[in-house]
Image (tube, grey):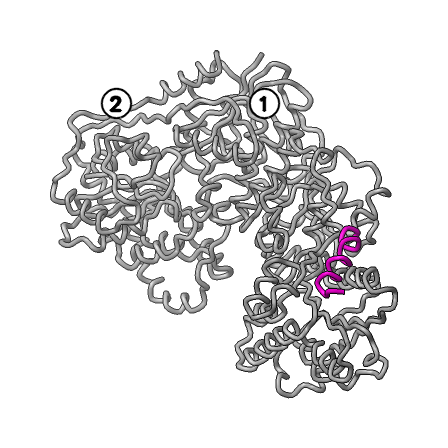
Amino acid sequence: MRGIQVTTYNPNSPIHGGKIRSRALSEIFVATFGPQIEVKNYYIGTKIDSLSVTYKNLPQIEDVLTADYLESMALQEDVQADYVVCEQPWGWPLVAFLKSRNPKLLTIYSSQNIESSLKERILSHVDSTSCKQIITRIKKLEIQAAGEADLVIVCSHSDRDWFENNGVEKKKIIYIPNSTNADRFTSTLTTKNDDSSYFLLASSSYGPTNESFMDLFAAANQFLPPKTEIKVVGGISNYLATTVGSRRATDLDGAIHLLGVVTDQKLHQLLNGAMGIILPVKFGGGTNLKTAEALYYNKEIIATREAFRGFEGYINASNVQIVRDTHDAMIAVWKAINRHRSGVVDEGQMPVRDELTWSYWTETGPKIIREALSL
Amino acid sequence: MTIWLNVTTTNRWNGHAVGISRVELELASALKERIKFFEIRDREFKEVAYQQIISEKDVEKKKYVPRNSRLFQFFDAQKGTSTSWLILKMGGIALSLIMRVLPDNFQESILSNLYRVIRKFDKQLKKRISPIRVDDKSAKNSGINRIPSSELTSVDFTINHPFHHGDTVVSCGLDWDYSLVEYVNLIKSEIDFKFVTWIYDVIPVYYPEVISSVSHCARLFKHFALVGGVADEVVYISENTRRDFEKFCHQIGLKTPPGRVITLASDFEISTPKEGETLELSRFGIRGQYILSVGTLEPRKNYWTLVNARSSMVSDEGLQLVIIGRVGWSTGDLLTYVNHQKGKNVIILNNITDDELNQLYQNASALMSASIAEGFNLPALEAQSAGLPTFLSDIPTHRELFPQAEFIATFDTPAWSRAMQEVAQGRYPKSVKPFIGKRWNEYADEVIALLKM
C-alpha cells in the first residue's frame, strides 16, 4: 500500500518529541502497510505572515493558518494514495479534499496532542476576540478530523477521553504512547560511573517548561549538596545560558552545567549515567518522550504531574517524585540523593520496561492498527 | 580529646546578643574553663581564645542610641530603595555617631526637630522612593557579616582545622550562614570526631512563606539536610522542633541522628519597679500602661495582627503596644504605620540592652506574641520569668512550652483586641508567684551532661 503522512514536522534528524513521534509512527505504518510512505511537510511557517489578515496580531498560529493553503498544494499523486496519515488538525482539510477525490482512501488521524487545548493555553495571555475564534476553529477541525478518520491514534488516555467526550467512536481510537529509542543505545553505553552525582535536564526550549524549571530549581545552587549539579542538554540550555546571571537566577549559577544540543548517543550516555532526571513540564499536549526515557532507565525522577500525562500508570513508582514548587523540589532532590547514596536504588533490580520503547510499538502496533481497521 | 565550641556567630555578631547568639554566648561563658573555642574565618577553622570572643561588656560599651526615635524608624522605613535610601542611611549613620557624644537630653530634642524638617520633604521623597521589595534583606539585618555566597558552594579544597581524632565539635550558631556542616562533612572524611549541633526550628521547611526569600529557605534546607546526614547528636530546643526535624529527615529519606531536647533558659526575674523608672520609660516614648511584644520585625512574628488589634480596641485605655526587635524584612508598611501614628498606640524599639529589656518586662502589663511559627519563643519564657501575663498564638510550640499562657488563634484580631482590652482593664494581674524557669547556668549543666564532661 502506498501512503502519505501529512505533518507539520520535517522528520529528518528529529530532535524533539513531536518529530521523534512523527518518525516513529512512520516506521509503524511501514511495518503495517509496507515501505511506501511519503512525508508531506506542508508547513509554510513564517511565510504565512504576509498571507494572514484576520489573525494578523496573534502569535504562534502560523501552523493553524496553514490549513487554508493545504488544498492548493495537493498533488495528483496524493489523490492516488491508498492511505493518508494526518498528524495535526490543520492538515485535515487536505485529507478531506483527497478523500472527496478518492473515496477508497484510508484516513488516519494520528494525534500528537489535543491541539486546541494546547493553543488555548499558549495564547492564554493574549486578550483578543480573534484568539477565541482561532481556538474554536482548531477544535472544530480536531473533532472533524477524528470524527471523519477511519482510525484515530492517541498518545495518552486523557486524549482518548477528550475525543470520546467529543463524540468520536470509541472502537476506532487506539493508544500508542510516546516511547523511547533507548534500547537501541543501551548496548553501546559505557559502564556507569558509581560516583555519578548529577541530575539531568533534557528539554527543548519551550516557554512553559523553561518557566517551570525556574520555578522549581532557581535556588538550586543554595540547596544542592556539594559536588552535585544539574547537567542540561537540549535547547533549554540556550534559555538558561541567557537567564543565568539575571536577578531571578542568582542562585542557579554554579548548580547547572550547560551542554547544549548533543547527539543521541551522548544523550543516552548522560541518561544512563545520571543519578536522577528532572522533568519540569508545566503544560503541553500529548505525552512527554523524556518521561518514557527516564522511566526506561529506572532513574530517580523528579517531575511535575503534567510530565506524567500518558504515563499515569507509573506515577506511584518508588523512583518517581511529583513536585509542584521549590519546596517539593528540594525534598525530592535530597530524597533522591539519600536513596542513591544508601543503595536503596538498584537499577539492575528494577523492572525492564520494554513497553516504553518504540521497538515494542513497532512490533505490536501493526496488529493493533489492522484489527482496528478490520484489515 | 578536646571539646570545641564554635563561636563564629558571636564573633561576627554586631549587636546585642539575642536568640541564637545568646545561646552561643551563654554556653561559651559557662564552659570557658573546660573547652576550646574556634571560629571559621577565610575558609579556615581557627582556634580562638575566650578573650577574643565579643563579650556582653563589649556590647554594653556601645553607647545607647534612642532607636525608638521616629527619625530612625523613618530611615528604616526607606529600606529597599537605592540611591535615596543610601543617602538617608549614610545620614543616619552620621547622625548616630554625633548622638554618641551628646548628652541624652539633647539627643531626643535634636532628633525630633530634625524629624520635623525631614517630614516636610517626605512627600517629595516618597515620590522618588520605590516600594519595599520582598527580598533577602535578612542577610543585611540578621546581625552577622555573611560570607559571600560564592564561597559557600565549593568545598573542593583542603580545610585547615585544629581538630584531632576523638574530639567533639559543638556548634549552636547560625551555621548555615558559613556552610559549617559542609566543612564538617569534609573534615569528617579525614578524621573521626563527634559533631554535636543545634536545631532551633525547621520553619523554613514547613513555613517557607514566612522566610525572607526562596534563596534563604533553600540555604537552610540544605543545612538541615546536611545536619541530618552528618551530625552525631542533635540538640533541639523543643519537642515540637524535634518532631519537625524527624519528619523532615523521614521525608528526605534519612534516619534522624540521635538527639535530645534541651529547652532554652532565662535569667530574668520579677522585681518591683524602682523609683524613677517612669521617667526612664518615657525615654522610650512610653506614657503609661503597655503590652510588650518581643522579636525581630518579620512576617513570621505576625505583628500586624497585634497592631490591628490595638487599633480596633473598643475603648482607648491609653494602652500602648511596645514592640522590641530588630528591623527584619518586609516591615516597610509596619514602620510607616508606626511613623504615622507617632507612637500613640504602637512603639518600636531596637538595640535594647539586657538591663533595659529587664526594666521593660518588669513594667509591662502583659506580653503578647502572635507568631505564626516558633522554635521556642524565648521572650515568652522571659516574660513568664518576670511574672507577666502571657498571651500566645495557639501553635504547637507555644502549647508545649508555655502551658500556663493564654492562647489565642493566630490571626483572630478581634480576640487579640479583646485580650488587650481586658489587660488594660486590669483583669490579668501579674503573677505573685514568679515563674520558675530554667536559668542559663542550668542550661549549661544540661549541655555539659550531654557532652559527658
- For the residues bearing labels 2 and 1, Cβ distance under 8 angstroms: no
- Per the image, is B170 magenta? no
Q: Which residue is mark 2?
A: B436
Q: Note whether B143 is above or below A278 in the view shown.
A: above
The secondary element bearing badge 2 is classed as loop
Q: How far separated are the C-alphas under marks 2 and 1?
A: 37 Å
Residue A350 seen from this side: yes
Q: Nearest the camera: A320 or A203?
A: A320
Q: Which residues are magenta?
A: A359-375
Q: Quadrant of the N terminus of chain B?
A: top right
- Per the image, is A362 magenta? yes
Subunit ID for the residue under disc 2 = B
Q: Note whether B166 is above or below A359 in the view shown.
A: above
Write the residue at 80% across / 46% down: A183
Q: Which residue is mark 1?
A: B47
Q: Note whether B205 is above or below B180 in the view shown.
A: below
